[in-house]
Image (cartoon, grey):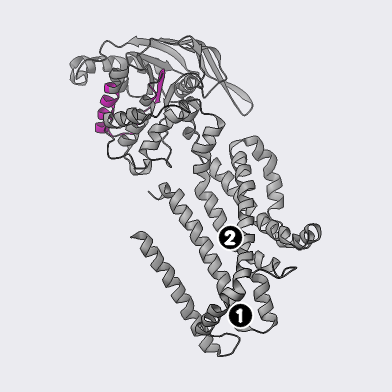
Amino acid sequence: MIQIKNLNVTYEAMGEGYAALENINLELGAGETCAIIGPSGCGKSTLLKVLAGIIRKYEGVVEINGQPIMPMQQKIGFIPQNYGLLPWKNVYENIRLSAKIKNKKDRDHSKELDFFIQQLGLAGLEGRYPGELSGGQQQRVALARSFLLKPDLLLMDEPFSALDAMTREEIQNVFLDVWRKYSVSTILVTHYVEEALYLGQKIVILSGIPGTISKIIDNPLFGIENIRNHQDFFQLSLTLRKMIKEDWSK
Amino acid sequence: MIEQRRGVWYLYGILIFFTLWYMAASLVNLPIIPTPWIVMKNLLGIFIPKILIHGSYSLWRIVAGVILAVIVGVPVGLCMGYFPKWDRALSPIVYLTYPIPKIALLPIMMLLLGLGEVSKILMIFLIIVFQVIIAVRDGVKSIPKETYYPLYSLGATFGDIFREILIPASMPKFLTSIRVAMATAISVLFFTETFGTEYGMGYFIMDAWMRVNYLEMYSGIVVLSCMGLVLFGVIDYLDRKICHWQYK
């Protein structure tokens, strides 16, 4: 369970304070997915960084299972826009990194690791370096790395936006498959309405500068088989678009 | 396959070097430039009884200087790159001292530290350490912020960041800095070895020159350049072993 209450974030630039996020309230049940959609510069990434424990200067309450954010204590998986793979580690080492850092002197993870490599279709690529992989493959590695930990919270910053349309759909399905197996609480930031509709049980619309939540929508279409081809999906995405347009032009 | 080809290129280099040398020798046709064959014959004769001890001394001084520079330069460079405060505090000092021609300090070093090994090794250390510091610092600075984020959110300690990101990310620039500094280090080593020692390639070459023994002098020069070749070869080898990811 993720809880955000009265979150305010300001950042300093040139000696002046700017509000990045204002009065954010959000609750996410364990194992739920939540898509955050908003215009550029509205503080989406800032919100993720707070949840990831990267930004520590904030006001308000941000809790995972009743505990304030502490990366040392909780298991938080964070996938940045560029997937955050280390170019000097091959696929296997990159995936293992999360377990290596989290459980220092722990049992070996090779069995789970092999399982995830199979699961995400990375078999045969273990020895490759990120520079030798396509964008889709890199994203699979990043997902494997995060899921290996079975995190309390998975954060993804525009995870699929650098992929071409076909690969994007494929990886979105890969993500949903793995997510269904482990039901990891996930928050993802996107600027595609369809992506939010397809992946988010909850859809949060952020707006303006500073970022505030203007709507939280419970997505009725989440998890329905082949929903992307249904009339309802188009209809709802149109409605959402309209809503967002009105909202952002305020 | 690639390894083999690389070896072949080294042979080409040596062949071209000898050809040019031979051409120069036959053009001048004076004892001051002997042909490569006579020098090689002489070298084979005197390498073990005469040159080996000098070569070992020179090699030890270079290796000791480089290792010292790595031990000091890498941590300082990493900290300057990672912590802006360190950078702000230390950069001016580095910039002020880096351009001082280190060779100008040799007399002071010799007075303070004596004519022995310490002043020579310290000289090499001083030449290499600044390049290492700056290369490593810039290597760390050029790491995109996002690279750290997944590790931060995993609760990585500074040790983890150090091991998993800072060291490997700065390694290519670090090796380049050693490469750049190595040639200067060898030239300066030569110079320092002409003072206050009876061992080292610098001493051997100058001594042969004084005795007008051109064959021995050239043998010494050949050994010195071979030392350079080997040292560069070792750095290239390390580069391919440790940093092969960047050639993918």
**Residue at the disc numbered 1:** B216
Q: Position of residue A103 (x, y in %)?
A: 46, 26
Q: Residue furthest front?
A: B49
Residue at x 23%, y 17% (from the top left corner): A233
Chain letter of disc 2 in the image: B
- In terms of depth relative to the viewer, which is nearer, B41 or A237? B41
Q: Which residue is mark 2?
A: B182
The local crowd at label 2, few if under 14, some if 14 to 19, many if 20 or more residues have their Cα within 10 Å, is many
Q: Secondary structure at mark 2?
A: helix
In the image shown, does B89 or B108 lie closer to the viewer?
B108
Cα distance, mark 1 to mark 2? 24 Å
Q: Is residue A172 magenta?
A: yes
Identified by mark 2, the residue type is: Met
Q: Position of residue A151 (x, y in %)?
A: 40, 20
What residue span does the magenta drawing correspond to? A149-177
Label 1, residues with CA under 10 Å away: few <14, some 14-19, many ≥20 = many
User: Which image quarter holds the C terminus of chain A?
Assistant: top left
From the top left corner, tell me how far across and down residue A27 is, in percent.
42, 9
User: Residue B52: which quarter of the image?
Assistant: bottom right
Q: Is residue B77 above or below residue B158?
A: below
User: Does residue A249 appear to the left or right of B192 in the view shown?
Assistant: left
Q: Does the image show residue B148?
A: yes
x and y, in percent, of residue A83 in the image = 39, 32
Q: Indicate the amino acid at tag 1.
A: Glu
* Figure check: A211 above or below B186: above
Residue B215 lies in the magenta stretch = no
Q: Residue furthest bottom?
A: B29
Let me know if marks 1 and 2 both belong to one chain: yes
Residue A59 as seen in the image, left or right of residue A249: right
